[in-house]
């Protein structure tokens, strides 16, 4: 499979929608998030600039593409051929494998495993954990921000697992 960049781009928008709800003043937004992030009222009064939103979207796209790589396994068969689709099509073994197994695990459930376990537990949690430890952040900071990324990456991986790949065979 090759990446469906339209789906990956759409998945990159998911954290924005999750953030709107997650950081709403009645959930973790407002005083709770402001306190755990050590943000002053003056900092909170500053509006987010367009370049910051675009940079966030770019980062989200990187995350979505990384989730594609770890979630859509049939892509790795193409990788064995150096990304050359014609070479893959010339290989009877690769073609037979993809015909039998190529669409396996393109499910929401598979996305949950990869978004939550591979994405969050093995990447985000350790990186965020370092910030909590060495920047002297509270455990609540880890829960608020970690919960946001766990939910965002899980939903992103579900979407990518289901619709993020374009079959080459």
Image (tube, rainbow, N blue to C red):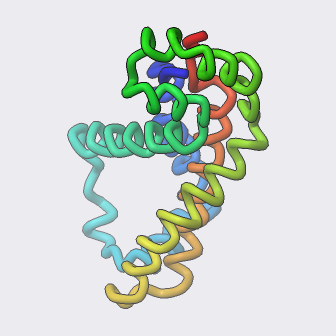
Q: Nearer the viewer, residue 92 or 109?
A: 92
Which residue: 27% across, 42% down? 55
Q: Is residue 44 above or below residue 103?
A: below
Q: Is residue 140 above or below residue 21?
A: below
Which residue: 42% across, 83% down? 132
Q: Position of residue 140 (x, y in %)?
A: 55, 81
Which residue: 32% across, 85% down? 135
Q: Position of residue 27 (x, y in %)?
A: 63, 62
Q: Position of residue 137 (x, y in %)?
A: 41, 85
Q: Quadrant of the C terminus?
A: top right
Q: Nearer the viewer, residue 121 or 22?
A: 121
Which residue: 43% across, 25% down? 81
For residue 79, what is the image quadrant? top left
Q: Nearer the viewer, residue 151 or 4?
A: 4
For residue 163, what is the image quadrant? top right
Q: Quadrant of the N terminus?
A: top right
Q: Position of residue 28 (x, y in %)?
A: 58, 66
Q: Indicate left or right for 157 with 108 as reference.
A: left
Q: Is residue 117 above or below residue 60?
A: below
For residue 103, what is the image quadrant? top right
């Amino acid at each position: 499979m090759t990446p469906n960049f339209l789906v990956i781009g759409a998945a990159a928008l998911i954290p924005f929608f999750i953030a709107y709800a997650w950081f709403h003043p009645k959930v973790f937004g407002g005083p709770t998030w402001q306190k755990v992030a050590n943000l002053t009222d003056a900092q909170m009064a500053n509006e987010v600039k367009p370049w910051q939103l675009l940079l966030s979207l770019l980062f989200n796209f990187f995350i979505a593409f990384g989730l594609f790589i770890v979630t859509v396994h049939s892509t790795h068969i193409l990788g064995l051929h150096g990304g050359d689709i014609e070479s893959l099509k010339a290989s009877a073994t690769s073609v037979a494998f993809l015909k039998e197994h190529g669409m396996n695990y393109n499910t929401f459930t598979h996305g949950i495993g990869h978004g939550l376990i591979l994405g969050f537990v093995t990447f985000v949690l350790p990186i965020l954990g370092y910030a909590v430890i060495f920047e002297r952040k509270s455990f609540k900071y880890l829960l608020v921000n970690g919960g946001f990324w766990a939910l965002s990456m899980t939903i992103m991986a579900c979407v990518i697992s289901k619709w993020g790949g374009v079959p080459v065979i």
